[in-house]
Image: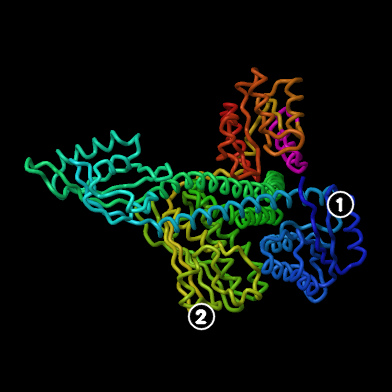
Amino acid sequence: MSAPFSILLVEDDHFDAIEFQRAIKKSQVDIEEIRICKYAEEAIETLETWIPDCMFIDYQLPKTNGLELLKKIKSIVPQLPVIVLTSQGDERIAVEMMKAGAMDYFPKSEINSEKLTKAFHTMTQMREVERKREKAQKELMEKEELIDKIALLSPNIIYVIDIEKWANIFHNKQIWSILGYNENEFTPESNSVLLSLINVQDQSAFRKHYYHIKHSVNDGEVIEKEFRLMHKNGSEVWIITREVPFKRNANGEVQEVLGTAIDITGRKFVENELIRAKKEAEEASRIKSDFLSTMSHEIRTPMNAIVGFTDLLLTSNFTGQEEEYLNTIKYSADNLMVILNDILDFSKIEAGKLHLENFEFDLREKLTYLQKTFHIAARKKNLELTFQLAEDVPIYLIGDPHRLNQILVNLLGNAIKFTNEGFVRLYVTVEKNINSIVSLKFAIQDSGMGISADKLNQIFDSFSQAHENNASKFFGGTGLGLTITRKLTELMHGTIHAESELARGSTFSVTLSFSKSDKPSLKNAVNLLTNFSLNGYRILVADDILANQILLKHLLKKWGAEFVICNNGQEVLDAILEQHFDLILMDLQMPVMDGITALKIIRQSFPSYAAVPVIAFTADTFAESLPELEGYHFNDFVTKPFKFDELTKKIARHLSIN
């Protein structure tokens, strides 16, 4: 049972505030309190004395807008979930708000009890994730403090013992405080003291250890050994000894041993604690992955329809300007996915799970779309935006154009963002051209505000921004763009360099190597879509998103397949009872019954489907690497938004279509 929510609504329209409260009352959410502020200033003052569980803010407010208010809120309460309400469904505004830290973005016309219930469910999950994260962090800090104290208080013991008489010759008395004894309780000449202190289970190892020293150890040779001693209260005290021969008898055998010992009881305890701490850290990492997986799913699901339908339109008979518009939309959608994936990519890079692709591409075509993408932003600021390619730059290359594009998008975006007048220029030149490998230098030069020398060495650090003091003049960012750019460059075995001077502009240079392709054999998604056929095959699709269903319905019709569309896993089980299918495309996250549960039942209870391929169809970019999916035998994974060539290749491979 989740705790009730307290809400702060920032809305200057009285009727909109009433409608919001009505929707809240109809939702299945336990609400403790709702406070309403008409103005941004009033909301900020309220936060100084009262922190709600969540906030809903109107984008259009007197004297300010929701973006500025959101930034102030995040500066005061960074973890507070904030949902933006607006009368206009502007995707640009939505992207800005999400980048600034908004949890979600609702047009007012779409606000209803169902939508609010879902939003509060998501907030409940986020609240639980944050609670667990804070608990894990606190426990880890406590463990670190404990380790520090043990390290500071661990005393050394110095001693000389006679291993023939088993007697103490000398010790610095630290051993008695360690073992809880008063030094007067034992006399140094007592032969039974040493053996009586050794743990009974270590008596045999103790004798063998000193037998080895007596007969086999050379002078100056250091021997280490761990023993358990008996504390006065009966508990065990672990020590580690470092010993050397100190005196020999008439026969040349070692008689006395000089040693130092350290109480490692605390270390033994810490070892066990570290094992537990490691498990807790792994759990915290899993919670983080779950959060990123959820956010990835929420972002990529609507993008699947945008990218998919754009690709589908490109197979129609559009020509000329219409085709150019569609290509520009597709390219911009791909860029949006690159931007939205910054955080996910950063996590993947840190985890070593980001892999490069390697295929042919037309460099000039990619740069043309890139220039069109930034043309409007540059024109709004009256900037001269030019791309210059040297004549000897090859047209066709083999490598990863998506990561190259991501690098250039980050660098060009920064250049335009921090340049108020003048120019932004991209130069592409050949650094080296040896046999089939060409090394290209991409230099982005601008006439912007520049970067001070003390900031220049920090700009590639995570969450670092060179113009913090001027943040109010620019739209916010993750502070990861240049970090990801550097890491991607290094992943592609390239180099990146920055030169800048305040008020004199900046130049960022990236050098990357590619294989050359003299004879282009590029195959785009349109050609694959046109030639692909599923005539004679029955396909079962499970996806609860209507836009995805419509897209797949169009594709499967075009490919000539017989198909059935299901909304959840239960419908899948009902469908396979009525007819046999050659392939199943299964979404993982669905209501009623998810795809993982459905597949488990299919594998266990439907022997006739043992050889039927099941492809996971998911917006979760981490799904393929999740250990909990290893035992469910998905034949493959397709991540939404999917590329047609990726989907067709995987279907063709599993259905053995040539």
Q: Which residues are magenta?
A: 542-564
Q: Which mark is residue 165?
A: none
Q: Earlier in the sequence, mark 2 or mark 1?
A: 1
Most foreground residue, 45 or 349: 45
Which quarter of the rendering shows the C terminus? top right
- In percent of width and height, residue 202 lies at 32, 36
The answer, for residue 556, to whether it is visible in the render is yes
Most foreground residue, 442 or 494: 494
Query: Which residue is disc 1 drawn over?
Result: 112
Most foreground residue, 24 or 252: 252
Which quarter of the rendering shows the N terminus? top right
At x 92% / y 61%, what residue is drawn?
18
451 up-or-down from 82: above or below: below
Q: Amino acid at mark 2?
A: Leu
Q: Residue at the top extreme?
A: 607
Question: Magenta includes 198?
Answer: no
Query: Which residue is disc 2 drawn over?
Result: 502
- In percent of width and height, residue 333 lies at 66, 54
Determine the image quadrant of residue 254: top left
Instruction: Evaluate if marks 2 and 1 touch, with contact meaning CB atoms under 8 Å apart.
Output: no
Real-space Cα separation, disc 2 to disc 1, in angstroms: 51 Å
Q: Amino acid at mark 1?
A: Asn
Determine the image quadrant of residue 595: top right
- In percent of width and height, residue 611 lies at 60, 22
At x 45% / y 70%, what residue is drawn?
457
560 up-or-down from 20: above or below: above
